[in-house]
Image (cartoon, coloured by chain):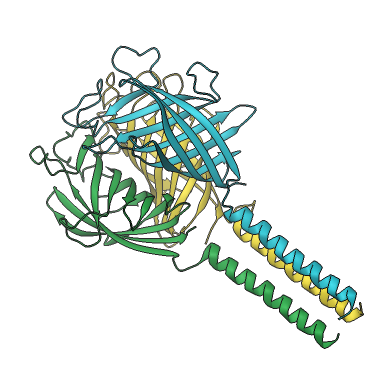
Chain colours: A green, B cyan, C yellow
Amino acid sequence: MDAKTLMLAIFLLFLISASSDAHTQKIRARKPCKHLVFYFHDVIYNGKNSRNATSAIVGSPVWGNKTTLAGQSHFGDLVVFDDPITLDNNLHSTPVGRAQGFYIYDKKEIFTAWLGFSFVFNSTEHKGSINFAGADPLMNKTRDVSVIGGTGDFLMARGIATLMTDAFEGEVYFRLRTDIKLYECW
Amino acid sequence: MDAKTLMLAIFLLFLISASSDAHTQKIRARKPCKHLVFYFHDVIYNGKNSRNATSAIVGSPVWGNKTTLAGQSHFGDLVVFDDPITLDNNLHSTPVGRAQGFYIYDKKEIFTAWLGFSFVFNSTEHKGSINFAGADPLMNKTRDVSVIGGTGDFLMARGIATLMTDAFEGEVYFRLRTDIKLYECW
Amino acid sequence: MDAKTLMLAIFLLFLISASSDAHTQKIRARKPCKHLVFYFHDVIYNGKNSRNATSAIVGSPVWGNKTTLAGQSHFGDLVVFDDPITLDNNLHSTPVGRAQGFYIYDKKEIFTAWLGFSFVFNSTEHKGSINFAGADPLMNKTRDVSVIGGTGDFLMARGIATLMTDAFEGEVYFRLRTDIKLYECW
């Protein structure tokens, strides 16, 4: 093998390894391709706060009602929400989007819920939506739900969101910190 | 380097680039690997049309009921459906499948809903299902929801579906054009 | 072309094909990267069994109620559940996790439902959750729903779950065999 052929071989090997590295990183990066943190704020309707409520009970077990969350860890209450999303933990900050969807309390013994919801953005910063689903054992300090898809700026997104209850006031207001890590981005 | 080695080198480079092209296209094609257009037709139960209704209110806010969609942009109404899917915009065309799932109106100020549903096919053309989830701000001319998975012919499918209200008659009938673009196919 | 160049060429071709094989397998294996079988057990509340019920009706159509599943194939009933998961088909085996979520009966003519739920594990064997969504035409011997994501040990999981009704006792108890095939794992 002469010198030129050797150089060619090395060059080709470099090409192969470069392309394969780039690839692995694109598809299956262990660090997020996008990392976003938001807060959202849920004010549940309790019969008196219709002006500023952002969520309401729309399904309840036979032993419950739709004005007050049910006993037994709210088991069976279905809540629909349209909550403001903010960049910091202040309910009165300018919203950057809306968190829309539902949760169902699904266990009698402890507080835990199942969530299906979207973050909907329409600002100069972000256009599009991120869709989430998963179990929310809300007494845990942090818990993860799946990012199951996205649209617009978040087309084909996949990953997880780590939820943390940042505030909880009686049975009327709670605030969730949402730490979104996307491992697949376009 | 002699002519044969040069040809070999060119051939190898071609192989590398071909394989990497093919790959990129398979995994992350910017044009859909499958593109399908369907219509589905929702006839909501209103107390009088039980014979031909395909959907019904099964959850409602405390100020609503299950025969009439609630005020305030239907906020809080949960509707379950089993709607015929057709290839054209005619309700009376032979259905090619069923759209099954639910929507929840989730905002007081404007009409917007959260959708979880499937297209279920069992024809010579398509066998299997496509699963969808996402926000549907239904006053927008078009809006995107995520394809979150599939089964049968659509195993491992991912992508988006663009929804367009193709007809809307009072609070009883609507028809959605569904433009499905899959970016991951098997 | 001399012998050494030929060997180099063969070696490079081998490298390319090896890397591309490994890749295809990682991303798009046609056989599951994880295969798991579980059973889960649903005991629906019927007004008398509050002690051992694991699910309850929380939404119903206008012609139904929340103690008894509705006529017309239970169309319109929304059920929320927190069911034990076991490794075998015995309700009294030690649970290895919980199946949490909801199903909605969505068709008048036959029994079929739409499912959104999670398997939640917190054992030495498995930590994390698997999230599912899809149509469940429950009169079919087997039916597939999508694995739409996961967390913890199941981070970024995708695939399908084949459900099979393993037991069905009146309108109070059923047991589902769940055969989970993940085609994307981390």
> Among all residues in the image, which is located at the extreme right?
C2
Q: Nearer the viewer, residue A79 or C100?
A: A79
Residue C34, quarter of the rendered image = bottom right
Image x and y of residue B24, in percent: 62, 58
Quarter of the figure that contains the N terminus of chain A: bottom right
Q: Where residue C178 sits: x, y (%)?
A: 50, 43
Q: Quadrant of residue C44?
A: top left
Which residue is rendered at x = 61% and y = 38% of the image? B153
Q: In this figure, what is the number of numbered marks?
A: 0
Examine the rendering and report whether any part of residue B157 can be seen.
Answer: no
The residue most toward the front is A124
Q: Position of residue C173 (x, y in %)?
A: 39, 32
At 14% from the left and 48% from the top, the residue drawn is A171
Location of residue A153 with respect to B127 vertically, above or below? below
- Against B125, residue A164 (above or below) is below
Residue, x 28% and y 34% (percent of image)?
B111
Q: Relative to A86, is A102 above or below?
A: above
Q: Position of residue A97 (x, y in %)?
A: 28, 51
